[in-house]
Image (cartoon, rainbow, N blue to C red):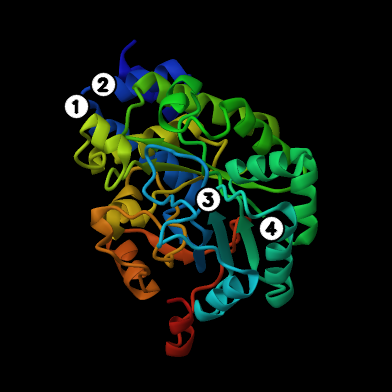
Amino acid sequence: MDPRIILETARHREEITAIEALLLIQEGPGILPPLFELADELNRRSNNDVVTYVRGKRIHYTNICRAECSFCSFRRTKVQKSAFTLSPAEVVRMIREAGPIRQVTLQGGLNPDLNLQHHLEMVRTVREEFPSLHIEAYSPSEVHFVARRARTSIQDVLRRLRDAGLDSMPGDSADILNDKVRKKICPDKLRTNDWVAVVKTAHRLGIPTTATILFGHIEDEINTCEHLEIIKNIQKETGGFSAFEPVPFIPKDTSLARSKKIKGPPSLESALRLVAISRIFFCRLIKNITLDWTKVGLAGAVESTKMGANDLGSFSVDSWVIRGPEANGKLHVPSTVVRSAVQKAGRIPQERAPFDGRLIPAVRTRKEELILV
């Protein structure tokens, strides 16, 4: 099939298939200009040139993890000097130090020493200290692990977390939703059907999630398109995904990079291609496409807003977030810098409320601008 016919199909808001997405991924560089142009057009139709961000903070509560994922440089064993586990009080302190934020994202490893009661206390403590803060926490992998350790159901864990104050979940640990690949890169983590079961259960309980894909390692184009198709089918059934985020593999200090001799992360061009294809593939099903600045740098993230992305996420992270070389070791970016870069790209920067997408009026005074840093 002619790839340009596929693009014309998408231009008229008709859904393209996973096989058609595969053809767009496999096509040579000559397809990129019309691909990017169409993704930008569809993005403009959906989001009116607005590029959103959220005033939030990402915090890791532990880096101790029983899973030995070969793509991960975050994991530590309990006996390593750099291993840590934060108490609920320490998480509260870090949130206070972050300033007036609207959202906190809590994530960690699969730590066997932290039981369900610990996680409930964590969420409950944060909720009591910050009643209006949006709490995004626990990837599907973490929920699955906690449920197994507690010998209870996924539904029970999610319901209790929700009742303790959980608002939403990050869609991490999807990695690649293909079990043959998962057995090679993350054999100790949940399988594809488990990941699907967790997010569907969350959506049914009124807990929205994001969705991600890890790319640029040992996956092939077919694996990528299978992954996209799984996400699309879930969204058609539940409508619970608020955003989709392609996540570039960062090979530094990973065993996967050493074994496969992967020298660097995927190119920005490949990331932008996947962003554009994601916009076209999900079309009206998932409104928000994100590319994380910590993986491609602020310039790369802003560039993606010309190729289908419309959301830049939060701009404050802790030191344990895996960052690409383009992030230059930064842990936060001032909102003034972000807004200026977005405006130079011909877009309209706008703070949003967590998850519901509601736009928040831009602040103008010096005091208010400092709040957005």
Question: Marks 2 and 3: in contact by CB < 8 Å?
Answer: no
**Which mark lies nearer to you, 2 or 1?**
2
**Mark 3, residue position:** 109
Q: Which residue shows up at 61% across the image and 55% down it?
A: 137
Please give the label number shown on residue 30: 1
Q: Which residue is mark 4?
A: 119
Q: Nearer the viewer, residue 305 or 142?
A: 142
Compared to 81, does 249 lie above or below? above
Query: Badge 4: how crowded within 10 Å, few (<14), some, or many (20+)?
Result: many
Q: CA distance from mark 1 to mark 3?
A: 42 Å
Measure the C-alpha gap from mark 2 to mark 1.
Answer: 8 Å
> Which three-letter amino acid code belongs to the residue tagged 1?
Gly
Secondary structure, mark 1, is helix
Which residue is painted at 46% across and 56% down in the image? 79
User: For this rendering, which residue is in front, 145 or 273?
Assistant: 145
Q: In the rendered image, which quarter is residue 118 located in?
A: bottom right
C-beta proximity under 8 Å, tags 2 and 1: yes
Query: Tag 4, which secondary structure?
Result: helix
The relative height of residue 252 versus residue 352 in the rendered view (above or below) is above
Q: Going from the N terminus, do you reach mark 2 or mark 4 first? A: 2
Q: Is residue 63 left or right of residue 208?
A: left
The one of 231 and 172 positioned closer to us in this rendering: 172
Inspect the image, locate mark 3, and give the three-letter code of the amino acid beneath it.
Gly
Inspect this view and state whether residue 188 appears.
Answer: yes
Give the residue pinned by disc 2. Answer: 27
Q: Quadrant of the N terminus?
A: top left
Q: Position of residue 287 (x, y in %)?
A: 53, 44
Q: Earlier in the sequence, mark 1 or mark 3?
A: 1
Mark 2, secondary structure of its residue: loop
